[in-house]
Amino acid sequence: MESVLHEILPIVILSLAVSLTAVLISCVLGMPLGVCLALSRMRGRSIIKALAFSGMAMPPVVVGLLLYLLLSRSGWLGEWQWLFTTRAMILAQVILDLPFVIGITLTAVEAVPEELQFQLQSLGATPWQLRWTLLGESRNGLMLAAMTALGRGLSEVGAVLMVGGNIEGHTRVLTTAILLETGRGRFAIAVSLGAILLTLALAINLAFIKLRRQTSR
Amino acid sequence: MTSRPLYHLLDVCFELSPDFALTIDDWQHSAGQTLCLVGPAGAGKTTFLKVLTGLISLQTGSIEFDGHGWSQGVASIDDSRRIALVPQRPLLLSRSVRANVEYGLQLRGFRADDWIKELLHRLGLEKLAAKSAQTLSGGQTQLVAIARALALRPTVLLLDEPTANLDPASVGLVEQVLEEMRQRHRTTLIWATHNMFQARRVADRVALLLAGRIVEISARDDFFHRPVDPRTQDFVNGRMVY
């Protein structure tokens, strides 16, 4: 029992570390971009919007393959030596998370009535203060964006397997471990890992619901 | 009352839609005065107020505010922060009533706890201060919108039917608070209203707008008792059919 725990705990911690870091990076990059897209009237805006929404359907295996080619020794980014490291896994998840964060943020900010923007400006809001206030008004949507990205990251297997390599103690996460244990015929462990993954998802969603209630007050 | 021109609009044209444009040939307004804008629905009162906020880009014409010209009708942030608008249908932030009232001051990096407390008290919002603004009735929302604009102690207060959703007692209260504000801070009020009795009570000058144009503008008594334009006579006497 102790040895199983000893084996599983680092996998759980690594899964959370990779996915949370990827979500954090995606939110820092994607939320301001989503707000700017929602408020901007620039040309080509609808093309960027269409790209963001199409990105949500990006197959993880394809992202994994492209990243593999880029990060492999002969690839454009081969000098970084990121292949089969947690950095490559985080990068893969950021690429997969970003369209969700941008798309959901954009939709949430667009849902704020345009008249509110005018009224806030009439109270003296500068463009940056306006963006900041609208982010606050869209907070439920932003939390949803972060949660969706986290859910996608935690359950993702194709891309992290290809660029992480599923190396024990280094790049093995819950999903890749489930795949490995199933292949080995150790179904009990695979099911246990699956249960842990589901429990994590449930705990995160409960925390989200509680946070949403608090911020809605 | 000493009068100096605060606003000067010249040859202003703002096309809201293909079939409606606000056209102001030459209009001036002095500081500290209350102007009531009257006219039927769709006459351009709200559009006129929006142009006066300095937040709307004009197709043609010029606006001068307190001696500063606004490029294409858009005010500098310093000028625009001297003007506050109470909209016809106010939208509040998903925050407490107090936070909504403090919002404009917060944008300017100021705190004024005693002033906010006084305002909430004067407008009967004290007990609602900690309540979420999203749970308020239409009338309460209107009062919060008035409080959040007054909190800024603006040079100009633009009021778009500010008492439309209020009960008679609250209408009296708002008129009284606004009059106090005007006397205390020499605030200029530009007030769109459908209520002729209200215009008679609060205005120094009254303007009639029809189809985006000022038909007549004069001192209150002249407007109601000695109107020059036949359309004003019809409007004042309730004979105008629109």
Image (tube, coloured by chain):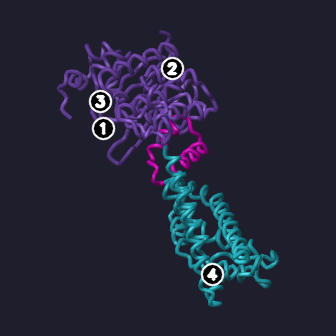
Chain colours: A cyan, B purple
Q: Mark 3 lies on which chain?
A: B
- Residue extending furthest top? B1
From this view, report whether residue A209 is shown above or below residue B188: below
User: SS at mark 3?
Assistant: loop
Whether marks 1 and 4 lie on the same chain: no
Q: Which residue is drawn at 47% across and 9% down?
A: B1
Numbered tag placed on residue B118 in the rendering: 2
Specify the segment rendered in magenta: A110-138
* Pointer 4 local density, CA inside 10 Å: few below 14, some 14–19, many at least 20: some
Q: Mark 3 points at which residue?
A: B39
Marks 1 and 4, Cα distance to the nearest angstrom?
71 Å
Residue A171 position by quadrant: bottom right
Is A66 in front, or is B223?
A66
Residue kind at label 2, given as amino acid type: Glu
Q: Position of residue A1 (x, y in %)?
A: 69, 76
Q: Residues within 10 Å of mark 1 (few under 14, many from 20)?
A: few
Closer-to-camera residue (A211/A193): A193
Q: Position of residue A178 (x, y in %)?
A: 62, 81
Circles 2, 4 touching at the beta carbon (< 8 Å): no
Q: Mark 1 points at which residue?
A: B42
Q: CA gap, disc 3 to disc 1?
A: 8 Å
The numbered disc on residue A189 is: 4
The answer to whether marks 1 and 2 sit on the same chain is yes
In the rendered image, residues at marks 2 and 4 fall on the same chain: no
